[in-house]
Image: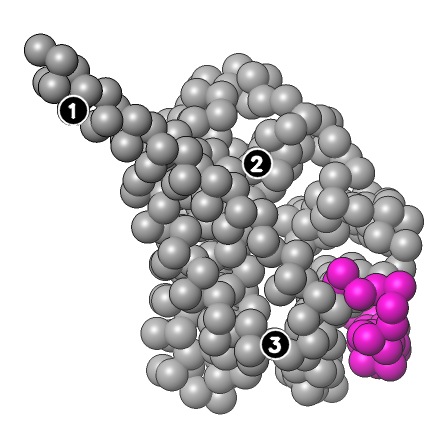
Amino acid sequence: MRPFLTFALCLALTGCFKRIALNSAADAVSGSGGAYGRDDDPELVRAAVPFGLKTMEGLALELPDHAGLRLALARGFTQYGYAFVQADGEPLAESEPSKAKPIFARATRLYLRARDYGLQGLHIARGVTEAQLRGTERTAALARLEKDDVPLLYWTLVPWAAALSLNKGNVALVGDLPSLQAMLARALELDESWDRGALHEFSLALGSGRTPPPELQKHFDRALQLSEGRRLSVFVSRAENLLAPARDKAGFQQQLKEVLAFDANDPKAREDRLANLLAQRRASFLLSTVSDLFPE
């Protein structure tokens, strides 16, 4: 029996050590986004991110109960889909819609993939399911979430809403809007200052056309306060979701020109450098569409 027991013990320890190693790798990989955020070369990041995402997906298959990996995957696929896929299609949407359509379709798939990873994370962390968030148990399910769950809630909500924004004719996605609004409200209730005002900034986009402008202005003011004016996407969101709907052409142009004038390499905004460079790209694109947004 002794050789058999020794062999069995070795197998058990090997499996244990493998899991420890996988968990350590997953923790390291899922928490490595800061290096990307400080980068000053968006195209380098564009080329590098897919490898990182596929690496995390491989780890996720081995670690079905690792919520942190699901959070990182939800965040990564959302950011990649918006910054490097959807952004490629938007300049073509009016002039060459047939070329934009497959690009937006791919962005939608990435967003839904991100959403599903976020839903997996919420289920692992708190037992919350997609059916609960969509149904009559929504309020009770959201009540189970705690402050530490806000990142997962946000990175589930955002890609879900992004998919809806690209598919406004999709009845199923449009029908999810009440769920998205409830998720955002719960996140704000749990930690309204999370990630230096990210929830308030997102409130501008989700509430545009539905929320009274004074309420949207409050969200902008709070996002600006929490970000200390160092996150350019806050100003871009104001231009898109407050100034454009108000038909304030002069204010829209002035806001975006101020975004372009910002020094993205300012040491005070180092952690947001990549995001700010991407926000400046969007500001430039939006300025090129002024004649379409504000027809004479």
Circle 2 or circle 1, nearest the eye: 1
Of residues 151 and 237, the one drawn nearer to the viewer in this rendering: 151
Q: Position of residue 256 (x, y in %)?
A: 81, 76
Q: State the image quarter where residue 35 is shown.
A: bottom right
Q: Mark 2 falls on what kind of element?
A: helix
Residue lying at the far top in this picture: please name it: 1
Circle 1 or circle 3, nearest the eye: 1
Total numbered badges shown on the rendered structure: 3
Q: Residue at x 50, y 50 (%)?
A: 29
Which image quarter is the N terminus in?
A: top left
Q: Which residue is mark 2?
A: 153
Secondary structure of the magenta portion, mostly?
helix
Q: Mark 3 falls on what kind of element?
A: helix
Which region of the structure is painted magenta?
A: 244-272
Check disc 2 and give the amino acid type: Leu
Q: Residue at x 33, y 28 (%)?
A: 16
Crowding near pointer 1: few (<14 within 10 Å), some, many (20+)? Answer: few
Q: Earlier in the sequence, mark 3 or mark 2?
A: 3
Q: Position of residue 158 (x, y in %)?
A: 56, 48
Which image quarter is the C terminus in?
A: bottom right
